[in-house]
C-alpha cells in the first residue's frame, strides 16, 4: 500500500481523487487522533509548518517585556498587523480596511451581535441552526433590552435557495433591524444563499450578519460577492491555522454603526476597523503563524480543497444512501456543496450507532439533536484533508455492519 512518505507534494489544481497527492498533504498535517476521526467541525490538524512556526516563537513570546525585536515588531498588542490583514483580505476577497483580527470566531460574533444598536421592540431574525452561543447573545439582549427574536423556518435537510430566501421574506417587517445567519449549517452541510439574503436585508435597510466559522477555507467565496454587512470566522477549522486566531469582516460603510466589544483606549475613530482589535494582550506566537497557514492553503488552492472535501463526503454518502434503512439529511447534489453530511437510521437510536461505531470499530462520528428543536436528529460526519479514502471506506463497511446487525436483534 502507498504510504504518506512515498511522495512529494504536487502543484495546486489537483484532482480530488489523486490519492498520492492527498497522502502527501496528510503527511504535512500529521494528525494525532487516537481513533479515526471523521468529525472535524471543531478544529483541523494544523500543518507542520504552522506548528513549527508557533514552537519557534513560544519562548520569544514569553520572554520579552516589550516586543521591540523581530518577528513581533510589526504586530500590535492584539497580534494584528497590516501584513496579516492584507493576507486575509486577499484570500477572502475584501479590503484590508474591512478586516480586523480576532482570537476566534466567537469574538467576532459577539462583537457584532452585541454591537448593533437595538431598541425595545426591534426585531432580530435568526435561524434554529445558528450556533448556540450566538443565540445565547441574542437571548441576553431579549432579556436585557426587550428586543424581539424571530426564527426563519428553514428546512432540516435539503432546501432550495428560493424557499430559504422566502422564509426570511415572510417574517421581515418594518421593525426588523438585524438578520443573523450561518453561512453553512454545520450538521447537514446546507449552504445558505447569503448573497440573496443579504440583498433582501439591504432592500429593507436591515443589517445582515454571517457566521462563517464553517465556510472559511471550506467553500470558495469572496466576501465582496456575499454582500453581507459583517462576517466572522476562525482560522483553526477549515483554514487549518492556529487555534486562538480568527477575523471579523465589516463592510466599510457599516463599521461606524457597530460598537466595539471593548472600548478603544487609543481613541480609534468610529469608522476605523482597528477599533475592534483592541482586546488586550494576546499570545503573539499564534497570530504570527497566520502567514504560514495562508501559504499552506494557497499551495493547495481553495477549489482543490473544496473538491476534495466534497469527494470524501460523496465517497461515504453515495453508498450509504442506497441502504433501505438510511435517510439522508444532506443533498449531495446541491451546489456549491460541502464536505459535511448527515443521515438517520430507521429504527435505530443515533447515540447507539455512534457508540457501537467507536467501541467496536474505533471510528468517531457524532450523533446530534438540534438544541432549538430536539426532533431534528441525525448522525453527522465531516471528514477533513487529513482523512484518507481507506478511513472513509472502513466507515461505510462498519456502518452497514452495525445497521444490518441491529435488524437481526
Image (cartoon, rainbow, N blue to C red):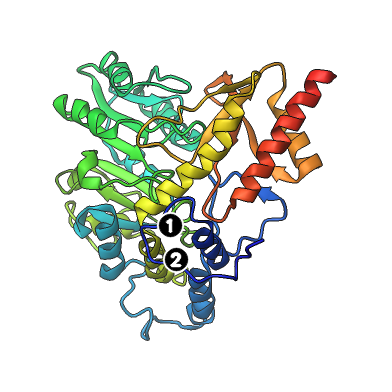
- The residue beneath circle 2 is 282
Local secondary structure at mark 2: loop
* Label disc, if present, on residue 103 of the rendered structure: 1
Q: Badges 2 and 1: C-beta atoms under 8 Å apart? A: yes
Total numbered circles: 2
Is residue 48 shown above or below 102?
A: below
Front residue of 298/185: it is: 298
Is residue 323 shown above or below 55?
A: above
Visible residue check, residue 103: yes
Instruction: Determine whether, in the image, residue 367 is placed left or right of residue 358.
Output: left
Q: Position of residue 218 (x, y in %)?
A: 41, 47
Front residue of 20/103: it is: 20
Image quadrant assignment for residue 45: bottom right
Instruction: Determine whether, in the image, residue 112 is placed left or right of residue 45.
Output: left
Q: Residue furthest bottom?
A: 69
Image quadrant assignment for residue 202: top left
* Label disc, if present, on residue 361 of the rendered structure: none
Front residue of 5/224: it is: 5
Is residue 175 shown above or below 261?
A: above
At label 2, counting other C-alpha atoms closer than 10 Å, the crowd grade (few under 14, some 14-19, many 20 or more) is some
Query: Which residue sits at x=25%, y=43%?
Result: 258
How much space separates mark 2 and mark 1, taking CA atoms? 8 Å
At label 1, counting other C-alpha atoms closer than 10 Å, the crowd grade (few under 14, some 14-19, many 20 or more) is many
Q: Position of residue 387 (x, y in %)?
A: 58, 52
Instruction: Determine whether, in the image, residue 2 is placed left or right of residue 238.
Output: right
Q: Position of residue 302 (x, y in %)?
A: 36, 54
Query: Which residue sits at x=49%, y=28%?
Result: 330
Q: Position of residue 123 (x, y in %)?
A: 30, 22
Amino acid at each position: 500500500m502507498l504510504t504518506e512518505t512515498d511522495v512529494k507534494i504536487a502543484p495546486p489544481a489537483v484532482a480530488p481523487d489523486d490519492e498520492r497527492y492527498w497522502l502527501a498533504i496528510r503527511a504535512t498535517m500529521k494528525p494525532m487522533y487516537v481513533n479515526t476521526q471523521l468529525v472535524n467541525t471543531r478544529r483541523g490538524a494544523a500543518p507542520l509548518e504552522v506548528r513549527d512556526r508557533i514552537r519557534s516563537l513560544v519562548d520569544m513570546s514569553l520572554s520579552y517585556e516589550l516586543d521591540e525585536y523581530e518577528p513581533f515588531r510589526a504586530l500590535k498588542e492584539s497580534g494584528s498587523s497590516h501584513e496579516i490583514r492584507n493576507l486575509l483580505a486577499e484570500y477572502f476577497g475584501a479590503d484590508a480596511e474591512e478586516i480586523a483580527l480576532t482570537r476566534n470566531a466567537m469574538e467576532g460574533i459577539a462583537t457584532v451581535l452585541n454591537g448593533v444598536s437595538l431598541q425595545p421592540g426591534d426585531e432580530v431574525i435568526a435561524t434554529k441552526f445558528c450556533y448556540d452561543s450566538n443565540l445565547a447573545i441574542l437571548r441576553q439582549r431579549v432579556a436585557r433590552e426587550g428586543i424581539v427574536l424571530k426564527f426563519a423556518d428553514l428546512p432540516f435537510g435539503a432546501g432550495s435557495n428560493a424557499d430559504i430566501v422566502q422564509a426570511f421574506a415572510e417574517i421581515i417587517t418594518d421593525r426588523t433591524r438585524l438578520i443573523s445567519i450561518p453561512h453553512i449549517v454545520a450538521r447537514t452541510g446546507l449552504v445558505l444563499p447569503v448573497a440573496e439574503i443579504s440583498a433582501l436585508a439591504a432592500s429593507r435597510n436591515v443589517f445582515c450578519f454571517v457566521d462563517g466559522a464553517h465556510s472559511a477555507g471550506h467553500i470558495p467565496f469572496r466576501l465582496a460577492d456575499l454582500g453581507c454587512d459583517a462576517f466572522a470566522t476562525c482560522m483553526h477549522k477549515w483554514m487549518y491555522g492556529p487555534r486562538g486566531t480568527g477575523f471579523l469582516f465589516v463592510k466599510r460603510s457599516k463599521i461606524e454603526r457597530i460598537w466595539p466589544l471593548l472600548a478603544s483606549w487609543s481613541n480609534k475613530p468610529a469608522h476605523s476597523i482597528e477599533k475592534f482589535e483592541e482586546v488586550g494582550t494576546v499570545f503573539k506566537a499564534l497570530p504570527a503563524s497566520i502567514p504560514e497557514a495562508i501559504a499552506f492553503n494557497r499551495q493547495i488552492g481553495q477549489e482543490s480543497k473544496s473538491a476534495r472535501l466534497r469527494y470524501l463526503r460523496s465517497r461515504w454518502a453515495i453508498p450509504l444512501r442506497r441502504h433501505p434503512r438510511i435517510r439522508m439529511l444532506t443533498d449531495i447534489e446541491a451546489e456549491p456543496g460541502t464536505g459535511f453530511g448527515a443521515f438517520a437510521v430507521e429504527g435505530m437510536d443515533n447515540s447507539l450507532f455512534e457508540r457501537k461505531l467507536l467501541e467496536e470499530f474505533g471510528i468517531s462520528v457524532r450523533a446530534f439533536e438540534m438544541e432549538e428543536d430536539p426532533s431534528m436528529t441525525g448522525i453527522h460526519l465531516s471528514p477533513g484533508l487529513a482523512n484518507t479514502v481507506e478511513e472513509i471506506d472502513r466507515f461505510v463497511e462498519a456502518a452497514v455492519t452495525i445497521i444490518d446487525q441491529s435488524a437481526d436483534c
